[in-house]
Image (cartoon, coloured by chain):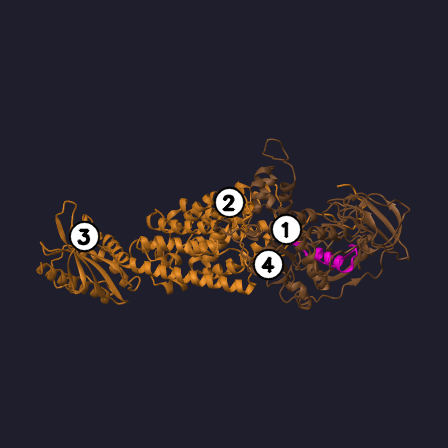
Amino acid sequence: MVRMKGGAPALAVAAAETLQAPSSRLVITGRQGPSACGPVRVKRGDRVHAGQVLFGPEPGEDGAGLVPVHSPVSGKVVDVQPAPGPDGEMVPAVTVEVDELGERVEPLARPWEPTQPGQWPAAELRRFLRTAGVDGAACPGQGPLYERLEQGLDGGVLVVNAVGCEPGLPSEMLVAGAYPQAALLGAAALGRAAGASRVLVAVHRGGPADEALTRALAEQAELRTGSMPVEIVRLADVDWFWVPVLLAREALAAAGIRRRGGRSGEPSPPMMVESAATAVAAGEALLEGWPVTERLVTVSEQGRLRAVRVPIGTPVASLLQGHGEQETSETPVLVLVGGPLQGACVPDLQVPVTKSVSAITAMPPAMHFRPEAACIRCGRCVEACPVGLLPLYIARAAAAGQMAEARALGARECLECGACTVLCPSYRPLLQWIRLAKYGRARRPGNGGDL
Amino acid sequence: MARATPLQASLLIQPAPHVHAREASLDRMLGMSLIAVSVPTVAAIVRYGAPAVGVLAAAIAGALIAEALCCLARGERLTSRAWMASLLTGILLGLTLPPSMPLWMVVVGGVVAVGLGKHVFGGLGQNIFNPALVGHVFLLASFAATVSAGWAGQQPVLALARQGEVVPDHLPLLWQGGPGPLGAASPLATYAAAVLMLGWRLGRWMAPAGFFVGSAVLAMALGWDPVFHWLVGLAPLTVAFFVHDPVTTPVGAGGQLLFGVGVGLLTVLLRIYGSYVEGAAFAVLVMNALTPLINRMSVAWSRRRLQALREARPLKVSTQAQWARDLRSVLVLVVVTAVSGALLATFYQAMSPIIASRQQARAIEVGLKGILPEAASFEQVAEVDGTPIYEARDATGRPLGLALFVDAQGYGGPIRLAVGIDMEAQRLIGVRVVEQSETPGLGSRITEEAFLAQFEGKSMDDPFMPGEDIQAISGATISTMGVADGVYAAIEMAREAWEGR
């Protein structure tokens, strides 16, 4: 397994900041996470209350599979037309100008005891969470949350990632550490909604989230012993490439749940990974009876980390302290949704934060890139790959247009962690080639393209 | 993706990952390899002085000239990594050669190494064979005797061993290698470089481990001392550098292990049965040629693992802390070393009678056949004071006489003689010096044919006194006396054996 310089983040969880200069105009998009949101419910000129549905089904409507988006503020709809989302893709969007009235809709109905999700019928809990707009993915490319929850774990294990997704970018750790009670409650709720038999919250041993969650769990007897018990799993070595699936496997092994190879006979229990941010969103919705309209974003600027809680629809520019003037400056800068290893470039600083934006990284482009050289077959990428693939051969096949061969070598099993590319001494764009084989079509007919 | 609002000029858009590990750079790998290779280079220069400097400089010059010309011809830019790669090739080629090489040959070797070994395949990363060894083998094929030469009138230690002569012990050999390539001037220095290469993660342990195991097993099975094989010739350089060349060795851990085992087996096989003295260069090149095949095996293994993954069999992931993993790997290493050490020791124990008998057989082959070339077999017929006495017979089974080895006391140490005696005729057949450490130029002249010829056909009843019936070597009376006494003692023993029949 690859170890990166930099080490595990040893920062204390500062109380989550609230934004110093909140934006007066929010752009709430109709695509907040992996799930579909449904049609827009307001039109230009409408007044909206905080908590009012902007996209998707109203409370009480069914709208199967659709996760509604709610207005974080009271204000006036000044625009209803497509706008760029965080990745630059044009999506339906509602622009709300914030007013001073602070009008709110009625809280969401919670027919069962909110602090004991184990007592809720699973289907009712799923419906409640969906109505509250809880959405999220544990890693890029994961499907809609409610498809996973409804498919169910059938007595399996839910692992909540409270560590992070990249070395040096502990977004999940910060969320869980800032809202430990909501994280535990939400973990139990997600476990109940998915029909899990055990819920493991994976933390970095001795880290800030470990401390906060342990204390919170000690205070909440019903979460330790209730019908949906939550366990904290402490992992020692998180100083390497975190890929949520691998994290989950480690958490299972650490909890003493053996997951052995198929040949040895013992079947592995079903497993599901969710991020701590999703759990916190679920927990807060239960505790407050209020839909998800805010997001704690980890902001990394020039290596300094902050956690800022903002309403969804806030422009990325207002999260960044040092980059307001960058818009006119000639110094090139990378602003990423996510971290330096897997983050996507923001094409415009006015793009809005969504429920699934865990981190914003602003960094100068790495200056030590060199032009790509020939592969010297040193095998560093083979050593680095957490899945055990041979990245050099997948990339070679993809570059030759042999997409079927690239997929046979595991292009689709690639988790896109980027380790191979980061460690290639010839600066070869291995992951880019692998992505081409993973998602793309064969470039030429007759060479085995199977799409 | 739809086009977003106008982009800010300062915002970059690029696919992830957005960082690159600083330590992952070809230039850095080459630079660190050059630092590692400087250790045996300095050792060679300290030991051999100016000749070593000349050979290394000529090899580097040849390599750099070829690099410049090839890049010019192919219209490529001469990058720092091109220079560094060729510099490394040049130094490594120089280290494979003996200090006595004529410099023009070395320059040719350098040009061939980089030109034929690398650029004809398309440059850095494209070659199949290790460039330095391509240059070495070219020189070996063209000037076999020169490349296999020793130093200061002594033959390379590998050649001595093959002739059945006694070679220095392990520790002296480790500190100061026998005559041979510059890279074995001090095997200790070269192995220090090997440790650096592993420590700096420029190579992994699999290939060296495979080499040690492969060479040890075959050497012992054939009745040779394995440690000797690790210390002489190109073995230290192979372990330190040639098995770590990323371009020409396999990519996966299993493949690297296989590669090392192959190089170890072939090295010993070619050293013992090959027509050249040293087989390591050919061994590495043969395994280079097999590397694409080994890599295909790695691909097949990877596909099998993927099949398991697709059938949702999870991979094993360790949950221990890093220090625990480090400790575990150290413990595993210790256990593996201990177990393989014990296995090797047991094997060696079991093999040592065979080794001894084979060494004896080789000594007979080399020593006694020198006296009795027409003999087809030597059969031990008696033992006098622990000295075996052999009866030589020709192909038809007719006895030719008795033959034996005796140790005599010389001026610089023991002199080991092979003596053949025709008991029917009561005459000496001949005497050969198998081993001696007399003063070069004086006492060492006892090995000369002119001196030894006087023993041929001498009567067993002669007094064997220097100055009387033995022509002494001037300035080496004690050496002469030693040989005479030794021959006399041999006659006494043969007589005793003959009477005891």
- Nearest the eye: B318 or A73: A73
Q: Is residue A181 magenta?
A: no
Amino acid tagged 2: Arg
Q: Nearer the viewer, residue A201 or A398?
A: A201
Which residue is disc 2 drawn over?
B304
Q: Which residue is mark 1?
A: A418
The amino acid marked with disc number 4 is Ala
| Front label number (2 vs 4) | 4
What element does badge 1 sit on? Answer: loop
Find out whether residue A279 is within the magenta segment: yes
Tell me the shade of chain A: brown
Considering every residue shown, the one lying at the far top of the view is A446
Badge 2 marks a residue whose secondary structure is: helix
What residue type is disc 3 on?
Answer: Phe
Is the C-beta separation of discs 3 and 4 under 8 Å? Answer: no
How far is the residue under mark 2 from the one under mark 3?
Answer: 57 Å
Residue marked by disc 3: B378
User: Tag 2, which chain?
Assistant: B
Q: Position of residue A38 (x, y in %)?
A: 78, 44
Front position in the image: B376 or B202: B202
Q: Mark 1 and mark 4 in contact (Cβ < 8 Å)? A: no
Which residues are drawn in magenta?
A273-300
Which of the two labelled residues, at mark 4 and mark 1, occupies the earlier sequence position?
A: 4
Image coords of residue A39 (percent x, y): 80, 43
Discs 1/2, front: 2
Quick one: quadrant of the N terminus of chain A? bottom right
Q: Secondary structure at mark 4?
A: helix
The residue wearing badge 4 is: A251
Left of A153 or right of it: where is B360?
left
